[in-house]
Amino acid sequence: AAEFAKIWVPYCKRFNVEPRSPAAYLSSTATGLDSAAEEVAQLYREMAERIETAARLRRIPEEARLKYGDGFSQWDSDATRRNHGTILQILVDGRKEKTVTIPTLVYLSRE
């Protein structure tokens, strides 16, 4: 979701997108997507599929564990959507990444 946000937020600003919810926006314009919107829609579908796959398999892919570090290292096969320890992770640090067009993005999930 953090990687998708790096594409979605600038897209919203550039094309004055309302509502800012990708699901709501993409479903309301599903019949008339231009090439830029279709590319964003594809990225959104891929992101949603990765999230659903992780939830179904009850594990975080190794790629996400390596990229985002400690926050997801707590997630194991015994964890579920509703039964896990607190996870707090800075996914995008807007103070450090000057090329990023979104503010700091923090993930917080509590049991």
Image (tube, grey):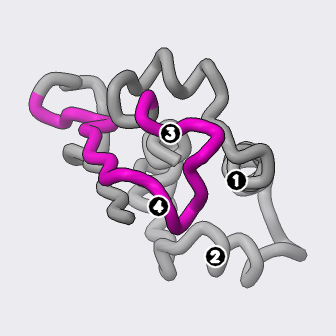
Q: Locate residue 77: give its quadrant.
A: top right
Q: Which mark is residue 55?
A: 1
Q: Considering only order in the chain, which callout, 3 or 2, is on the residue closer to the N terminus?
A: 2
Q: Residue at x 57, y 62 (%)?
A: 81
Q: Is residue 84 above or below residue 99?
A: below
Q: Nearer the viewer, mark 2 or mark 3?
A: 3
Residue at the spot 35% in from the left edge and 35% down from the top edge = 71
Residue at the limit of the structure toward the right, as seen here: 31
Q: Earlier in the sequence, mark 4 or mark 1?
A: 4
**Residue, disc 3:** 75
Q: Is residue 89 magenta?
A: yes
Residue 16 quadrant: bottom left
Residue that mark 4 sits on = 12
**Looking at numbered disc 2 in the image, what kind of residue is underneath it?**
Tyr
Left or right, 20 with reference to 91: right
The Cα–Cα distance between marks 2 and 1, rounded to whole angstroms, is 24 Å
Q: What are the residue bounds of the magenta stretch? A: 73-95
The disc labelled 3 sits on which kind of residue? Trp
Q: Residue at x 38, y 64 (%)?
A: 111
Residue 17 is left or right of residue 38, and the answer is left
Residue tagged 2: 25
Label 3 Cα crowd, 10 Å radius (few <14 / some 14-19 / many 20+): some
